[in-house]
Image: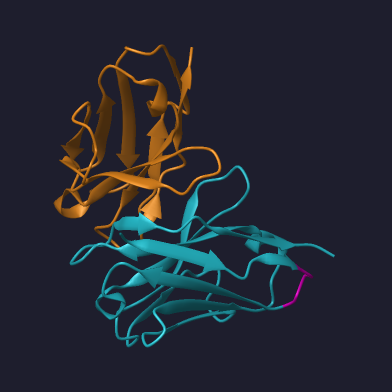
Amino acid sequence: EVQLVESGGGLVQPGGPLRLSCAASGFTFSYSSIYWVRQAPGKGLEVVSGISGNGDNTYYANSVRGRFTISRDNSKNTLYLQMSSLGPEDMAVYYCARRAASSFYFDYWGQGTLVTVSS
Amino acid sequence: EIVLTQSPATLSLSPGERATLSCGASQSVSSSYLAWYQQKPGLAPRLLMYAASSRATGIPDRFSGSGSGTDFTLTINRLEPEDFAVYYCQQYGTSPLTFGQGTKVEIK
């Protein structure tokens, strides 16, 4: 069974950093591109960042480029999102989602982790 | 960036009725690379459809998708109680990947 489990969310002060993790199981992690998709309270979905299976290719939305860094450790089946200079606009539930093979829709999602930016 | 506009914002229906949800794109979605997701409160989105009309694994056949170019439709025949949720479309033919703002299907 494919599972994606996010962790690391919480309360952070404006301008502060936070690192999210996504632990994967039930599939060959190194073969899959994984993305972070966020959802602000009561809002829709936004693709934030993505990384290829071997880590060579990354994607960032304009809204986070230069502030967020995506990485992965295939030996630990874990994806990371290092976030810095967080602002109120970054407050959201962050989901990790597996990109379907040879396509760009998302076939499995984690349960999400909430990031709250507040002083 | 391709903007997806979903309509209506809210659909009020009774169990057993048919739901028709629309997703319009600001420019043509290449190769009908359009997906639909269902999201229930407090839960992650769940893939329903991809390539506009292909059902994902385990999705019942009362869900169907159609469309091409700039106009896509998700149809839910004979609504079941568990179908009341928010539905999002997503285009994946052009970067950046984008989602619609969602249609809420609520119990009338």
Residue placed at 41% from the left, 11% from the top? Answer: B14
For chain B, give the colour.
orange
Point out residue A100 in the picture as x, y percentages from the top left corner.
25, 62
Residue B1 visible in the snapshot: no
Nearest the eye: A26 or A117 = A26
Magenta includes A44? no
Give the quarter of the figure containing the N terminus of chain A: bottom left
Does residue A32 sit above or below B90 in this rendering? below
Chain drawn in cyan: A
Point out residue A6 in the picture as x, y percentages from the top left corner.
52, 66
| Left or right: where A82 falls relative to B60 | right
Residue placed at 26% from the left, 75% from the top? Answer: A28
Nearest the eye: A110 or A91 = A110
Point out residue A29 in the picture as x, y percentages from the top left corner.
31, 76
Region in magenta: A12-16
Does residue A50 sit above or below A40 in this rendering? below
Residue B49 visible in the snapshot: yes
Nearest the eye: B44 or A60 = B44
Does residue B16 sit above or below A85 in this rendering? above
